[in-house]
Amino acid sequence: MDFYQLVLIGSFFLIALVYASVGFGGGSSYLAILAQPVFLLSQDVIRPTALLCNIIVVTAGTIIFYREGKIVWKEVWPFLIVSIPMAYIGGFWKLKDDTFFVLLGITLLIAAILLWIQPERIASSKKRNYNTTGTNIALGGGIGFLSGLVSIGGGIFLSPVLHFLRWADARKISALASLFILVNSISGLAGQFQAGLPGISWKFILPLLAAVFLGGQIGSRLGAQKFKPLYIKRITAVLILVAAINILKDHL
């Protein structure tokens, strides 16, 4: 195990711990780190690694939210019914390496902005007029496709939009984001395997999965009791922004 892998393991543990505490999987940060030029990793390694880490982290959180009654199927199905097949299509569709890294860099830039502007709480309980079933289906499908294409999970995009739409309280939004990340990460990964991934180095991936499992378990139990979600999101936004610029600098 070399120095760079030890850096990745430590980074992934901390990301999983912090992200799980606020209901995210951490896909954007895993991707931001893995795509840094210093690690010399291809998208064939980056994409499945990020999705596997997402799945490990958000599974526990999703189960906790479900047991708390925060996931109500009649409310969440519009976001999932199209997003799952679209994530599969996105995962199946392999881009050229330069195209992938440019798209990833742009996606991370947008994610950083959304994280920064996301409100700490919903100002009003009244839903906006365009918060309709059709809107939610289209929203889920679009984000689901992007999730599969760049392996980002999607919660980091869905959550700020739901806050803007005043879809529900912050805890329910976190619950839906967690479920959304889980099902679309599984679907996107299935699409990647169907497309035919080259041999995955489990020697490389397994220590990362162990790190995010441990971090995710701790984070999902700490919740917002130890970490202030707004500060976490702002700090993460800055880090993702720097990483995105570094990725784009090398591929534009």
Image: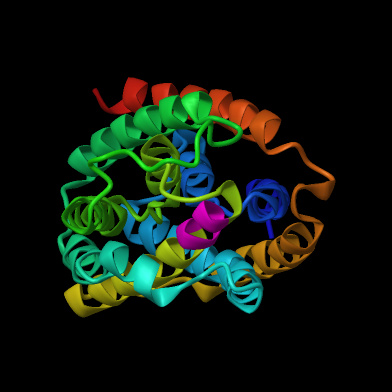
**Colour basis:** rainbow
Q: Of all residues shown, which one is farthest toward the front?
A: 126
Can residue 103 be spotted in the picture?
yes
Outermost residue on the right side: it is 226
Q: Residue at image x 64%, y 78%?
A: 67
Q: Which residues are magenta?
A: 172-177
Residue 82 lies, in percent from the top left, at 19, 67
Residue 104 vs 24, above or below: the answer is above
> How far across and down, in percent of the image, does residue 180 sit?
41, 63
* Closer to the camera in the image, 137 or 234: 137
Q: Position of residue 109 (x, y in %)?
A: 38, 27
- Vertical placement of 18 versus 188: above or below? above
Q: Considering only vertical position in the picture, is 150 above or below 35?
A: below
Picture quarter with the C terminus: top left
- Number of marks: 0
**In screen coordinates, is 177 left or right of 216?**
left
What is the quadrant of the N terminus in the image? bottom right
Left/right of residue 66 with respect to residue 114 in the rendered view: right
Asked if residue 198 shows in the view, the reply is: no
- Quarter of the image where one finds residue 74: bottom left
31 or 229, nearer to the observer: 229
Question: Residue 173 magenta-drawn?
Answer: yes
From the image, give the main secondary structure of the stretch colored magenta. Answer: helix
| Residue 220 position (above or below residue 96) | below
Q: What residue is shown at x 65% (from left), y 56% (from top)?
A: 20
Q: Position of residue 73 (x, y in %)?
A: 40, 76
Residue 68 lies in the magenta-colored region:
no
